[in-house]
């Protein structure tokens, strides 16, 4: 039987489930279809800005075609955003970077071509902004967009973009912007240009491993969102637990990360970005003091730009301590950054009347008209768990709905360790269905052909032609195993793939459960709710799904309609419930069980095959008796079997499973002597007395003020047992007589609560009819 699992609710659970190596094929296919549906919902032009992050997370498990489609749509959305003059969504850009970093080792020329279109568009917009002049903020934003995308490409080792058409023109453009008067523009251009050069660098082992670590850390931090404080030494643990493929980097530690930055000011800025984003101020100060490139002007400008981004978020005394760890520089641009950042800090604590004086002290060489762009710190925009998107797309994805509806049905059948599919003995103990045997003979056959259960739907000769049975009627007397047959069909379908090539669904319905239903418009969907899903939190969706399956794929659904005799007399054919019953009987694939006399409702339904349950064969009776669950003591089992084998009347009783169980349950030595076993009546009387004897002890009857022990009840005579259980005997007789008059077989909970008290009051002690 497949593993039973409920559908994932969050994106994290969805992705984890799909990555699970132990996932069964059917669930994997359902999840992939569901993921495709979710991404399609994200790809509409109206939705992608709002759902970009959810789509990027799903890209982790998309098949290549779906990933390319999503990449193209994200890039197009950014291109539109950089063209229409509106401010870009940080979440949209960060989602694109996340997608790129997820594709390490799977990057394709088509992916590079798509990003090339973005680069071309950004290049054109940058040139336009530069020509028009005065669009400093626009120019800065476009450079930052380019930098975020190139960072991601560096991290996965993309080493080829069009050299003549993109690389050289972009490098020239960025080099020019790196001398811009506006400090933010100049720094962003220098940083992005250095990142772009990194794409064309040779791929050494050391650089590749460092890129991998940067990629993994960035992914882990993006998934976890904005954080207030993270121990950098713990980041690696988050990387290992949250990122697929991170095991390749297990040899790296935080200390090694610091050492591998070397003289590269670009890589050093990637490291300080991590420390700043995790609010690791002491580690940041230490790193600045130890970095080999700490005197490099580009590193220092980039560092000041990063601190400018968060200067408003931390106490001034903390930011001042960090600034003290930064070495002084002779370069004008670095001095300008320092002057402006120091002035900005002072303004946080300077009274308003003194701020004008502070402003007049600023340098005139460079402009400070912008705030730093914080594309990385968009955790607040990436906090959605994706549950809304998953829920909406799940409702639109029939393959996923079918899979998890089937799982809910499996859970219904198998909950509590298969309790519903087990056989309950008179003792209250439960037996696996394997301990019961199904023997079926063809009705009206001169040869009495026996039909194995697994062959019910096989092709057979009938009336000189071949048929494949679709509607099968099985009759049998009470207790012979009709319900056990249904349980075994469900059990073997789930655990042994019985008829799996013919059916996808088995719907077992004890028809007595329809009693008391009087609605004028009772439907199959109502049936699914009451029978299978009433306790499920997604009952409405499950019922709707199963109803659609029955309506559109009924040939793959087998109905087990158990106990037609229990309802066939209750409704007229023209009554609402009578019509509903006919709807069930007319389903394309059915197995209907009933006692032989209750076939009125079948008159309008053609049956392809009629069978009769015939109880246990002799070897099955013996096997049942010798089962350890029935009698652990082999000597007792031997005596029971000898007793049955020696008395033909007893063999007739033992063929019926419920009677065989009663015989085994109530077995006592005197039952086996020839005088006691003279007639069927005496056998039944002996069984009844032993059942009453066991109930006498269980009910803790008191005699002379003392509760009977099990040993004392065993020593009571037949007369004494009946004497102390007479009220119970009277009640059972009254119930049996009432059932005969009203055609009630199953005394359900409503009857017990409404009518049983009246029976109890009206029946009282009486003299036993049997004497010792």
Image: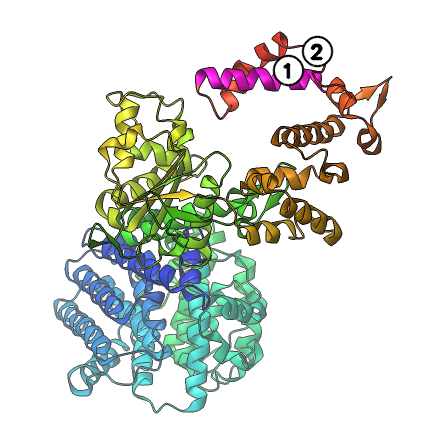
Q: Residue at x 71, y 31 (%)?
A: 690
Quadrant occupied by the C terminus: top right
- Residue with the mark numbered 2: 765
Q: Which residues are magenta?
A: 725-742
Q: Is residue 346 above or below residue 419?
A: below
Q: Which mark is residue 439?
A: none
Badge 2 vs badge 1, beta-carbon distance below 8 Å: yes
Say if the magenta span includes residue 727: yes
Total labels drawn: 2
Label 1: state its secondary structure. Answer: helix
Q: Which residue bears the numbered disc 1? A: 730
Q: Main secondary structure of the magenta part?
A: helix
Q: Quadrant of residue 452?
A: bottom left
> Which residue is most to the top?
762
User: Measuring 76% from the left and 37% from the top, which residue is drawn there?
Assistant: 670
Can residue 289 be found in the magenta stretch? no
At x 51%, y 23%, the residue is: 747
């Amino acid at each position: 039987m497949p593993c039973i699992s409920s559908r994932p609710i969050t994106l994290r659970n969805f992705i984890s489930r799909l990555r699970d190596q132990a996932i069964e094929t059917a669930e994997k296919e359902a999840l992939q279809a569901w993921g495709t549906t979710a991404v399609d919902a994200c790809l509409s032009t109206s939705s992608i800005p709002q759902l970009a992050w959810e789509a990027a997370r799903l890209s982790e498990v998309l098949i290549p075609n779906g990933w390319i489609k999503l990449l193209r749509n994200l890039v197009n959305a950014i291109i539109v955003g950089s063209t229409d003059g509106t401010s870009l969504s940080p979440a949209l850009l960060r989602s694109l970077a996340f997608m790129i970093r997820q594709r390490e080792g799977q990057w394709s020329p088509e992916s590079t071509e798509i990003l090339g279109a973005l680069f071309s568009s950004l290049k054109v917009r940058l040139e336009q902004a530069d020509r028009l002049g005065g669009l400093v903020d626009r120019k800065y934003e476009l450079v930052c967009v380019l930098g975020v995308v190139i960072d991601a490409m560096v991290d996965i080792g993309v080493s080829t973009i069009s050299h003549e058409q993109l690389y050289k023109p972009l490098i020239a453009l960025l080099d020019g912007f790196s001398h811009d008067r506006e400090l933010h523009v100049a720094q962003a251009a220098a940083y992005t240009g250095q990142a772009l050069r990194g794409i064309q660098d040779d791929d050494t082992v050391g650089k590749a491993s460092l890129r991998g670590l940067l990629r993994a850390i960035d992914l882990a931090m993006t998934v976890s969102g904005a954080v207030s404080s993270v121990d950098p030494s713990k980041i690696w643990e988050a990387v290992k637990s949250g990122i697929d493929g991170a095991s390749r980097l297990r040899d790296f530690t935080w200390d090694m990360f610091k050492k591998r930055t070397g003289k590269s000011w670009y890589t050093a800025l990637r490291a300080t970005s991590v420390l700043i984003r995790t609010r690791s101020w002491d580690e940041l100060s230490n790193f600045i003091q130890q970095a080999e490139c700490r005197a490099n002007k580009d590193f220092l400008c980039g560092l000041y730009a990063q601190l400018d981004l968060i200067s408003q978020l931390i106490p001034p005394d903390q930011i001042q301590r960090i600034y003290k760890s930064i070495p002084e520089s002779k370069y004008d641009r670095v001095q300008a950054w320092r002057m402006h950042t120091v002035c900005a800090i002072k303004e946080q604590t300077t009274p308003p009347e003194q701020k004008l004086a502070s402003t007049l002290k600023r340098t005139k060489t460079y402009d400070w008209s912008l705030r730093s762009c914080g594309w990385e710190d968009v955790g607040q925009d990436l906090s959605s768990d994706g549950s809304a998107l998953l829920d909406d797309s799940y409702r639109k994805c029939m393959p996923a709905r079918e899979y998890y509806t089937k799982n809910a049905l499996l859970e219904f059948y198998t909950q509590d360790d298969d309790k519903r599919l087990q056989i309950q003995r008179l003792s209250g103990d439960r037996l696996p269905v394997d301990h019961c045997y199904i023997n079926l003979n063809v009705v009206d056959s001169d040869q009495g052909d026996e039909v194995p259960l697994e062959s019910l739907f096989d092709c057979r000769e009938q009336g000189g032609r071949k048929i494949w049975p679709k509607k099968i009627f099985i009759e049998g007397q009470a207790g012979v195993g009709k319900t056990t047959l249904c349980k075994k069909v469900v059990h073997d379908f789930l655990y042994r793939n019985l008829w799996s090539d013919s059916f996808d669904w088995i719907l077992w319905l004890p028809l007595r459960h329809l009693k008391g239903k009087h609605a004028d418009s009772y439907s199959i969907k109502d049936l699914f709710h009451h029978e299978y899903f009433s306790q499920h939190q997604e009952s409405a969706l499950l019922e709707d799904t199963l109803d659609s399956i029955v309506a559109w794929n009924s040939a793959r659904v087998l109905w087990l309609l158990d106990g037609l005799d229990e309802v066939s007399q209750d409704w007229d054919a023209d009554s609402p419930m009578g019509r509903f019953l006919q709807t069930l009987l007319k389903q394309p694939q059915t197995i209907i069980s009933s006692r032989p006399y209750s076939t009125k409702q079948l008159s309008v339904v053609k049956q392809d095959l009629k069978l009769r349950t015939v109880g246990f064969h002799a070897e099955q009776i013996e096997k049942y008796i010798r089962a350890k669950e029935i009698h652990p003591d082999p000597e007792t089992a031997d005596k029971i079997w000898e007793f049955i084998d020696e008395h033909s009347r007893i063999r007739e009783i033992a063929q019926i499973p419920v009677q065989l169980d009663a015989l085994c349950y109530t077995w006592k030595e005197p039952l086996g002597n020839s005088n006691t076993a003279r007639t069927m009546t005496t056998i039944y009387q002996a069984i009844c007395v032993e059942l009453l004897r066991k109930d006498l002890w269980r009910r803790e009857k008191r005699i002379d003020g003392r509760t009977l022990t099990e040993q004392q009840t065993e020593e009571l005579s037949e007369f004494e047992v009946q004497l102390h259980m007479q009220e119970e005997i009277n009640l059972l007789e009254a119930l049996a007589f009432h059932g005969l008059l009203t055609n009630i077989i199953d005394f359900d909970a409503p009857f017990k609560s409404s009518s049983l008290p009246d029976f109890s009051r009206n029946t009282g002690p009486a003299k036993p009819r049997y004497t010792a």
